[in-house]
Structures are given as structure tokens and as C-alpha cells.
Image (cartoon, helix red, strand yellow):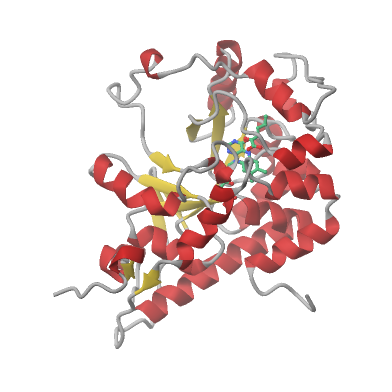
Amino acid sequence: MAGEPVNVNEFEELARKVLPKIYYDFFSGGAEDQYTLKENIEAFRRITIRPRILVDVSKIDMSTIILGHRTSAPIIVAPTSSHQLAHPEGEVATARGAAACNVIMGVAFTSTCTMEEVASSCKAVRFIQTFAFKREITANMVQRAERNGFRAIILTADTPRLGRKEADIKNKMIAPPFKNFEGLISTEAVSDKGSNVEAYAAETLDPSFCWKQTKAIEAGVVAGIIVSNHGARQLDYTPATISVLEEVVHAVQGKVPVLFDGGIRRGTDIFKALALGAKAVLIGRPVIYGLAAKGETGVKQVIDMLKNELEQTMALAGCCTVDDITRSHVNTETERFLCRM
Ligand SMILES: Cc1cc2nc3c(=O)[nH]c(=O)nc-3n(C[C@H](O)[C@H](O)[C@H](O)COP(=O)(O)O)c2cc1C
Ligand SMILES: CCCCC(=O)C(=O)O
């Protein structure tokens, strides 16, 4: 690739060049056969856009309100772990990039900077992501989230144990110190066979956590739902997230906003997810690639690229606001050749 990257995929190329192979494999990889990893991307390609033309698109407004927070675009940085493996400034740089773009920053509890460091370094609206950890870890996380101004807790529900990423096993991937666990567990989790990221997970997760233990929905503590397959890193052969979004949106019946992630690489992808009912999308790997390539500046560039592409898509499709993007602006695979009377 010559010159500056012009799209998010070119940032992946840059990241691949600068990162040690073991870390690039960790960030880019998916579980087992990586069927779902490919599908998360491919399924977007099978959806087409039905533009409206001769619409006054002289002003495009991408802003939206997510859980009460106004943001510049329906984009959230997905919580992903281990940012210092991509760049020495880690999640602090990512959060600053998000703040510069006025989008929400999702922080993984398995971050390499602490929640406190991220909170004190930027003004981004921050959500903290947790797994079903053992109880003392969760209690500690909730207290620190309140103290440090995190505005929501994202509970990742698909991880009673960690998915098998075979590249990590082969590479004997070593997890970085996850500083949020300091004082809570031994941060030196080790395994002599394969990836020690799995050893870490096994030490901290509570695999017995299930519906019996939570009445969260009845109690009204679920403010939103994220349709996600964890970037295809957990159970392989689950469907592409974009192919199940609409089904979830129908089931939720507008009771809470439905957010979406998995495979967003273009503004057109964001447009398609919104048309199928998502309130906003989360972006995982592209942000990490931006961080790896250029630190905070790279994160900002990646988010700006996606925003610019969304703006362009909205203009060419005849949508001035995100609320103007409707179900009838896309054709899914099954609809492509149907005649709508
Ligand atoms: C390297 C990497 C680490 C991740 N770490 C976490 C994590 O710690 N917690 C979590 O809930 N999801 C994690 N995810 C999943 C992301 O939140 C998100 O669902 C996924 O990256 C979206 O797909 P995309 O990468 O195609 O945008 C991780 C994803 C990647 C790629
Ligand atoms: C113990 C770290 C978990 C990170 C994670 O969720 C992932 O790599 O997908």
C-alpha cells in the first residue's frame, strides 16, 4: 500500500506491518475454523442499499442519543482487551481518540491501563465492560465504575469460558498484565501449554453464572442489548451478527435500544445495521488497528473515516438524519430479487 490509508482495511495492513506476528494474530483472530469471522464480514456484502434520490441532502446530521448521551455519530468504541500490546499508551490513547471524535468509549475490564487511568485521561463518555466474573471481582469493578464516572456497564454474556483461538495456542500467546485485577487475583496467571490468556480467563470467570441468578430484565436494569458474537472469538459457526440483528430487534419490541457489533468496516456497513434496526454500532478491530498504526491519532483517523463514509452514504442514499434510515433502505439476501408490490 502506498501513501496514507484511505479506508479502514488499509489500517489493518499498516497494523500487520508494525505489530509482532503474535499480537497481530491475537487481535485479528477468531475461534477455531474462523467461519464466523469471515461471515461477519461477508454477510454485509450480501445486503444491498436502496437509495432515495432527488432528496435535499444539503445538510446531513449523524448525531444521535445513546442511553441518554448525545454523540456525534452512532458509533461506539467496542470494549477490547490488551491495548498496550498494540501501542504503549494503550487504552488511554484509544479513549482520547474516541473523545476527540465525540463518540462513546467502551473499556474492557481486561484492559492494560486501569479504569482510573482511562477515566482521568479523557472526557469521553465511558462504558465499562465486564464478564460474569467471580463475585468479588464484579463488586470491585462496580464500585470503581461508580467512583470513576463510567456511565454504563456492559455485561458480556457469551464467555463462561474463553473461545479457542488456535493461533494464540500455537504462538503461546502471553496475556499482558491486566492491571484492573491487581490485588484481586494473581496477575501472573501462567500456563505452560498454549495461550495463557485462557488460563487468565479460567481463574477469573464464574461459569455457573446463568439466568437463575439474575432477574435483571424484570428488575429493569437492562438499559440496552448488544447483538454481538464477540467478534467471532467465542463459539465458531454462530451466524454473522448482521444476519440475526433484525430478529432480535423484533423480539425486543422497542423496549430498549438494540446496539450491534461484528464486521463493521465501512460506513455502508453502519448504514445497513441502522436500517435493520440498530441504534448504534460498536467497532472493535479497526480501532485497534488504528491504535497500532498511529496511536491516538490513528484511532481518531479510523473513527473519522467511518464517520465520513457514513455521512457520504447517508447523502447518496437520501437520508439527512439517522432516523431517516429505515428498513426499506436495504435489501437483504432473500429480498434481493423479490418484487415488492
Ligand atoms: C482483540 C479483541 C479483544 C476483545 N476483547 C474483548 C473483551 O475483553 N471483552 C468483550 O466483551 N469483548 C471483547 N472483544 C469483542 C469486541 O467487544 C467486539 O464484540 C468485536 O470486536 C466486534 O467485532 P469487530 O472486531 O469485527 O468490530 C474483543 C475483540 C477483539 C478483536
Ligand atoms: C481474558 C481476556 C479476554 C479477552 C477477550 O474477550 C477476547 O480476547 O476476545
Indicate left or right for 266 with 198 as reference: left
Residue 280 screen position, x and y as percent: 42, 53
The quadrant in which residue 180 appears is top right
Q: Please report the residue visible at 81 percent of the width from the left and 21 percent of the height from the top.
A: 191
**Quadrant location of ligand 1?**
top right
Q: Please report the residue visible at 65 percent of the width from the left and 60 percent of the height from the top.
A: 300
Q: Look at the picture and state if 284 lies above or below 308.
A: above
Q: Quadrant of the N terminus?
A: bottom right
Residue 339 screen position, x and y as percent: 20, 75
Query: Would you say residue 88 is visible in this rendering?
Result: no
Q: Look at the picture and state if 26 lies above or below 300.
A: above
Q: Nearer the viewer, residue 108 or 38?
A: 38
Q: Please report the residue visible at 32 percent of the width from the left and 44 percent of the height from the top.
A: 248
Q: Residue furthest left?
A: 341
Q: Residue furthest front?
A: 33
The quadrant in which residue 253 appears is top left
Residue 297 screen position, x and y as percent: 73, 60
Q: Quadrant of the C terminus?
A: bottom left
Q: Please report the residue visible at 61 percent of the width from the left and 47 percent of the height from the top.
A: 34
Query: Would you say residue 221 is visible in this rendering?
Result: yes
Q: Nearer the viewer, residue 125 or 266?
A: 266
Q: Nearer the viewer, residue 42 or 310?
A: 42
Q: How many marks?
A: 0
Q: Residue furthest bottom?
A: 54
Q: Look at the picture and state if 194 lies above or below 73.
A: above
Indicate left or right for 95 with 87 as reference: left
Residue 21 screen position, x and y as percent: 83, 50
The quadrant in which residue 299 appears is bottom right
